[in-house]
Image: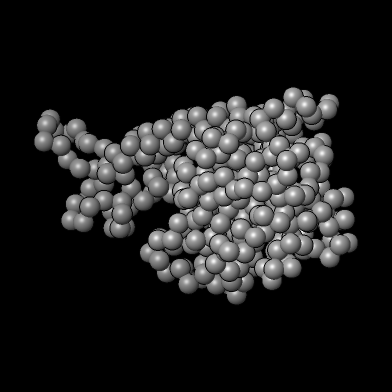
Amino acid sequence: MSARNPSSDGSNQSGGQEGTDGGNEGSGPSDRERAGEALRAAFARLAPQGTDEWNFMGAFTQLGDRYGPYQPGASALADLIEAPGRAGGRRAGRPGRRRPTGGAAGVDEKSEIEEAMGPVVEALRFLAARLSTLEARISAQDTPVDGAAWLTPARELDAWAVPIAAHLAVRTPGGTVVHADCGEGALLQELTSLGIDALGIEPRGGVALRALELGRAVAIAEAHEHLSGLPSRSLGGVVLSGVVDRLPVHALLPLLAECRRTLADGAPIVIVSEPAGVAESRHAPAADLVNGRPLQEATWELLLNRAGFAEVAPLPGGAAQDSRFALAAVTPSW
């Protein structure tokens, strides 16, 4: 399929722009639309039957066969090579479309475009190999069961709400404090009573509905989904509980990175986690399908430090019958 410009001397550039804006005199498609159609047709042609992966190697072979050896009239690129007066087809001042060689008479070198196509095709082959490697890695990663939050019971902060709220009230530089998973919003209530703007994130719709009925501000979402849509340095604090006990480690790392990005300088973060043995106490099917295994306190200290937080230390509080631990840290001020 040949994709030729209406004019190679640039005389139709304004017309192409008008066609894009819908003001062209003719009713035909614009250059951009034609190019898009050509790309879509090429993708459909090169996609092997029964797979969503494009046949990159076949495409590069066609590219090399079509544009590598000189084939007059085979494409618009061949016409560009052939035309002696058009820019880009040859170097200025050279009369022929091929450069003469210093060797035997009658032996021509490849044109500049033909010589350039070899490295281009090779670079695209390396790109295809890299893309295949990344796709293989992604397909090999374990994916949490959709809706795993519905399989775990709602665990409120209970006695932890008061000490955490007091800690946040002292350390927050201002701005909204986010709690995920917030449950019915006990911490939100404590923060609101202290004059702090608080928002809860709760993926379980029924639990979030009860919190909303109690007058608490709650978004029904997963923590990473909500945080990824917030501006950088826009939050005055983050509390993570519940969500940290049901996500695998490779999902916790980007979650901490999002917390680090969205927290303002000097803003606190608090992690509230179950003891490491809680996974064995889950009832089926949560024990089988929820990927998260609660991490130990020392592991959380390491992860918070690696994520760029400072002043990582245990937060006292809770109740004697509550086996959960809490770690507090702050976002450094640069």
Determine whether 164 is above or below 176 in the image. above
Residue 219 spot, x, y in % from top left: 76, 58
Colouring of the image: one colour
Q: Which residue occupies the foreground of this view, 156 or 146? A: 156
Q: Is residue 143 visible?
A: no
Q: Which residue occupies the foreground of this view, 288 or 67? A: 288
Residue 239 spot, x, y in % from top left: 65, 52
Q: Quadrant of residue 108?
A: top left
Q: Which residue occupies the foreground of this view, 289 or 5? A: 289
Q: Quadrant of residue 231?
A: bottom right
User: Which residue is at a point 54% across and 35% down the rendered structure image?
Assistant: 298
Q: Which residue occupies the foreground of this view, 30 or 239? A: 239
Image quarter hosting the N terminus: top right
User: Which residue is at a point 77% across and 59% down the rendered structure image?
Assistant: 218
Determine whether 246 is above or below 222 in the image. above
Q: Quadrant of residue 297?
A: top right
Residue 302 spot, x, y in % from top left: 49, 38
Left or right, 49 with respect to 125, comes to: right
Left or right, 41 with respect to 209, comes to: left
